[in-house]
Amino acid sequence: GRGPRLKRYRIATIPGDGIGPEVIAAAVSVLEVAARRFGFEIALERLPYGADHYLATGETLPDAAFTHLKDDVDAILLGAVGDPRVPGNEHARDILLGLRFRLDLYINLRPVRLLHPDLTPLRTDRRTDGQTDGERRIDFVIFRENTEGMYLGRGRTEGDEYVAEEVNTGKGVERIIRAAFEWARARGKTRVTMSDKSNAIPAHRIWQQKFKLVAAEYPGITPEHRYVDVLAMEMVREPERFQVIVTNNLYGDILSDLGAGLVGGLGLAASANLHPGRAGLFEPVHGSAPTLAGKDVANPYAAILTSAMMLAELDEPDASCALERAVRAGLAAGVRPPDLGGTVGTRAAAAWVAEQVSRH
Ligand code: NAD
Ligand code: IPM
Ligand code: MN
């Protein structure tokens, strides 16, 4: 008789602008191989939203498309949005921030992991922990609050006063802190570092209060606090001591690019926008890199590693691991695009990874 029906995932892609379409095509080619190899189906749909569509139609993200994404898909995979022809970036506000806010994807999870020892620009000959084995074990995650903070765009302009307001709600702060502790506990991590600027910004007291409150529920995990300025310094000097960092929307944005810089750059940085129990939005940390677009030189690994995060959330852990291992293998074998000092193009790198996944 017939075997059980294969699991089938509905995935909407929004390739977007610049290098977005190239890295999404690369990721999709790897996902298709993974689906065959690991026995699931993906129903892919490509949505046209981005700068071209906006300039041609005036539409950013139409309501019907939003409703469709909210109700009918299991995951959204986005390339990047941002185009020099839209200097105000209003389409990106509606598409990217719009999806984060309106889908209430309050967790922006951004791993920082050294996938090959030679990818870090940090000295490997003298570590701050006294070891000199020439290898650095950088492996932490940033929990970036994703639905409030400076990003709501609240404020006013009056004459020459441009006022931007930062929103920190008790509910919003508490839930991102709790998400960080839950993740830490589920993975046996022993420390969560919260970062704010409560010494200068009175509103950040809510971060202090909620951190204390939530940390008390997790006796096995040591809570620590760092002001964001000193955290930036410590991330450079001793990144291996961090396990889980939780912070607000803006600081999380900045620290995640700093983190990417510690482990090979934006060409390798993945992220997931999540609300537990709902469909997530998955996107590389990088932007549309307009100067690289259309040249087959963009690094596809960030988008492939982002797809691995998506597979993990869709409950395909073996396929997720296979993608990650294949990227690691590519990095080790010298299959590297120009941003990592190599000469391998977007398509060739993706084809190499896909081949590796098919033989997993
Ligand atoms: P960017 O991430 O596009 O580029 C920063 C630097 O990293 C550039 O030197 C670029 O060439 C390089 N780079 C980025 N991704 C790369 C990749 N995959 N392979 C090789 N090199 C890569 O950031 P930016 O220049 O500040 O922004 C460009 C546009 O992208 C702007 O419109 C910005 O608003 C937008 N943006 C969008 C997103 C998103 O949609 N998620 C994220 C960040 C920036
Ligand atoms: C990111 C990007 C976005 C952000 C921009 C494009 C609005 O930098 O995803 O990190 O600031 O969140
Ligand atoms: Mn960013």
Image: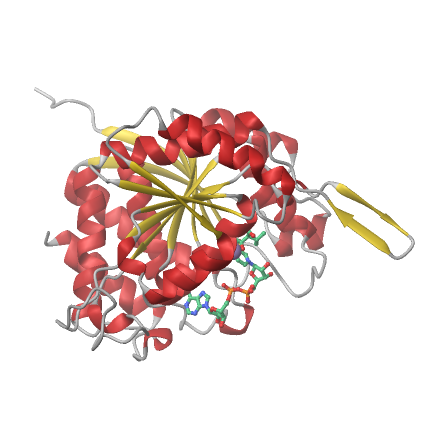
What residue appears at the point 23 percent right and 40 percent down from the top-left corner?
Answer: 189
**112 and 319: which is toward the camera:** 112
> Does residue 351 show up?
yes
Quadrant location of the N terminus in the rendered image = top left
**Residue 275 sits in which quadrant?**
top left
**Residue 122 pos. (x, y %):** 31, 73
What residue appears at the point 38 percent right and 60 percent down from the top-left corner?
Answer: 235
**Residue 20 pos. (x, y %):** 48, 58
What residue appears at the point 48 percent right and 50 percent down from the top-left corner?
Answer: 252
**Residue 49 pos. (x, y %):** 58, 47
Image vertical order of residue 22 relative to residue 6, above or below: below
What residue appears at the point 34 percent right and 33 percent down from the top-left corner?
Answer: 181
Q: In the image, is 117 to the left or to the right of 252?
A: left
Q: In the image, is 205 to the left or to the right of 122?
A: right
**340 and 242: which is toward the camera:** 242
Image vertical order of residue 28 relative to residue 213, above or below: below
> Does residue 21 show up?
no
**193 and 359: which is toward the camera:** 193
**Residue 262 pos. (x, y %):** 35, 66
Q: In the image, is 143 to the left or to the right of 35?
A: right
